[in-house]
Image (cartoon, rainbow, N blue to C red):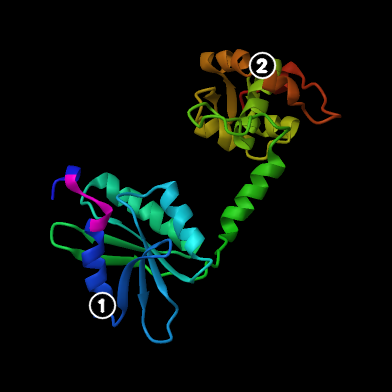
Amino acid sequence: MASATVRETDLYPPIKTYLEQQGYEVKGEVGAADIVASRGDDEPLIVELKLGFSLTLFHQAITRQSVSDAVYIAVPHSGSRQFQKSLKNNIALCRRLGLGLISVRLKDGFVTPHLDPAPYKPRQVKPRKSRLLREFARRVGDPNQGGASRRRALVTAYRQDALKCLKYLAEHGATKAALLARGTEVEHARRIMSDDHYGWFERIATGIYQMTPKGKEALADYAEELEKLSFPTGEQELPAAQQNDQTP
């Protein structure tokens, strides 16, 4: 069936047939509902029809929940990659809203029930919660504006730790990782500089790191953020010979 000729009413016959096969009596356009189905003492089943997922469709379905707990949304099925991705996301949304979801393959009227209505019971993932709270606690200040594009390099606690290492090297020159870790209180300073995700550090001897040209650029790029990052009070200036000691 050409997409230009598809109407919401094209969804009705296959859904009506499908529900009748489940033992329901089905009628269209009852009150404000597109489809109402009744079966014995069961909760009235309501289906809202649309030619695609939309905010309007979800608003209508949520409104119908004031009448019945058994509310479905129904859309035409498509084999496109975009539809499959959208379907997955909208199944998750329906689950949270307590809605059911049906798709209809219009070329042959095949009906697929993807989800039945049920109360949503959120399942918290404790490791994710712990990571979120840990990041919140470790981050210094509030360096990012809420809603900022993720394409921009956001200042995370990890990046702040890397900036502390960078600032220390800028002030003290090439330094042993162990000494730098003590001077900055960045516990994983050695790993940060060794992994070098930002291209700011280079190892010049076993356990000794210095700043790269890209690191010097970062000093200017993150000048405002670097001003907010301080070293522990009571830190003592290291003797030059100790800073540049080439032994591990």
Does the segment drawn in magenta span residue 3? no
Instruction: Please tell me whether mark 1 or mark 2 is closer to you in this view.
Output: 1
Q: Residue at x 63, y 30 (%)?
A: 145
The percent position of residue 119, horizontal first and vertical second, equals 52, 70
Which region of the structure is painted magenta? Answer: 5-9
Does the segment drawn in magenta span residue 6? yes
- The reply to whether callout 1 and callout 2 are in contact (CB within 8 Å) is no
Q: Amino acid at mark 2?
A: Ala
Q: Is residue 153 visible?
A: yes
Q: Is residue 114 left or right of residue 14?
A: right
The percent position of residue 183, horizontal first and vertical second, equals 74, 30
Question: How many numbered marks have been drawn onto this rendered protein structure?
Answer: 2
Name the residue nearer the viewer: 63 or 107. 63
Q: Is residue 49 left or right of residue 110?
A: right
Q: Quadrant of residue 185?
A: top right
Q: Residue at x 44, y 49 (%)?
A: 56
Disc 2, SS: helix
Q: Quadrant of the C terminus?
A: top right
Name the residue nearer the viewer: 109 or 95. 109
80 relative to 230, above or below:
below
Residue that mark 2 sits on: 223
Q: Is residue 206 visible?
A: no
